[in-house]
Image (spheres, rainbow, N blue to C red):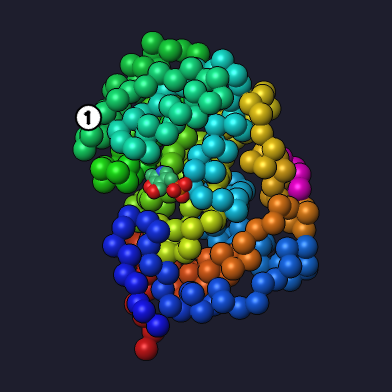
Amino acid sequence: MKKIRLLTPGPTPVPERLALRMAQPIVHHRSPEFEQVFARVREGLQWLFQTKQDVLVFASSGTGAMEASFVNFLKRGDTVIVIDGGKFGERWGKFAKAYGVNAVTLKCEWGRPVEPGAVEKALRENPSAKAVYVQANESSTGVYHPIRELAQVTARSPAILVVDAISALGAMPLPMDEWGIDVLVSAGHKALGLPPGIAFLAAGDKAWKLNETADLPRFYFDAKREPGSTSRCRCSARKAWRKSSSGMRGWRGRREQGWKRSGSSSFRRAPRRR
Ligand SMILES: Cc1ncc(COP(=O)(O)O)c(C=O)c1O
């Protein structure tokens, strides 16, 4: 078989051992067997996100989880602060336009991270802002934004911090609960080394509070239609939208084949067993 080497920021190559695991027959998404796998997957994701909150799983690309982070927490006419440091930062503004949300855009020179002071100033000048949207790693320029500091800034305001960690989770430290990140979204096809088509979102209490009044149109990406362990997510695993059982197997495989948390609380692959 021709071996293709992907040298892109994502999708990243799927290790052969995981590809083989995902080649097993599909499990029906309304079967007890699937329910068990799904429960273990969600537990593993809480470990990855370093959160006690439910991690929701969408059968979508990463942009689906970004969209979910808009529609589940905002109302039409709300103001948000979006950090635009590259191609993916630009996308926040496009969601805002599509959903009738006012975006105050903080443009960063490409290749430079946002200054926490600039976000603090924008929040002072826009006291009704509901959220700050940012990438952990802006993949188009390779810049890490200072997430820990931004979480400290937003914690002092009524706004939530929404972090797109699509290319960052698993590669850089992002302990959601410890740092106070309100919404964290990610996807399988970057640091996790899975095929595209599986995306994740976890939200903290401050964000769930906003969910109570959010009125943007949503259906497939409605967080409350997803299964979870709390009464907020009211769907049972068996009734959930169809999930990628192969993607789930891949993520389980990732865990079982030895992902470890490193001292800096990012993750590394354990040495290959001989
Ligand atoms: C930081 C970041 N955000 C969003 C996306 C969009 O994800 P997707 O292409 O899976 O929709 C990417 C993909 O490269 C990304 O790197």
**Does residue 39 sit above or below 26 in this rendering?**
above
Q: Secondary structure at mark 1?
A: loop
Residue located 22% across and 29% down the image: 109
Q: Main secondary structure of the magenta part?
A: loop
Image coords of residue 187 (percent x, y): 48, 52
Q: Name the residue that disc number 1 marks.
A: 109
Give the image location of residue 254, x and y in percent.
48, 69
Up the image or down, 19 lies above or below 268; here it is below
Number of labelled discs?
1
Is 152 colored magenta in this rendering?
Answer: no
- Point out residue 202 in the picture as x, y percentages from the top left corner: 56, 44
**Is 73 located above or below residue 121 in the figure?**
below
Would you say residue 209 is visible in this rendering? no
For this orientation, the residue located farthest to the bottom is 274
Residue at left 25%, top 43%? 141
> Does residue 234 show up magenta in the picture?
yes
In the image, 245 versus 144, the foreground residue is 245
Residue type for callout 1: Glu
Q: Residues within 10 Å of mark 1 (few under 14, many from 20)?
A: few
> From the Cβ of disc 1, is ligand 1 less than 8 Å away?
no
| Screen quadrant of the N terminus | bottom left
Residue 123 picture quarter? top left
Q: Residue at x 29, y 25 (%)?
A: 107
Viewed as shown, does residue 172 lie left or right of 16? left
Q: From which residue to which does the magenta span run?
A: 231-235
Judge from the rendering whether residue 195 lies leftward or rightward of residue 60; answer left or right.
Answer: left
Residue at point 60%, 50% (across, down)? 58
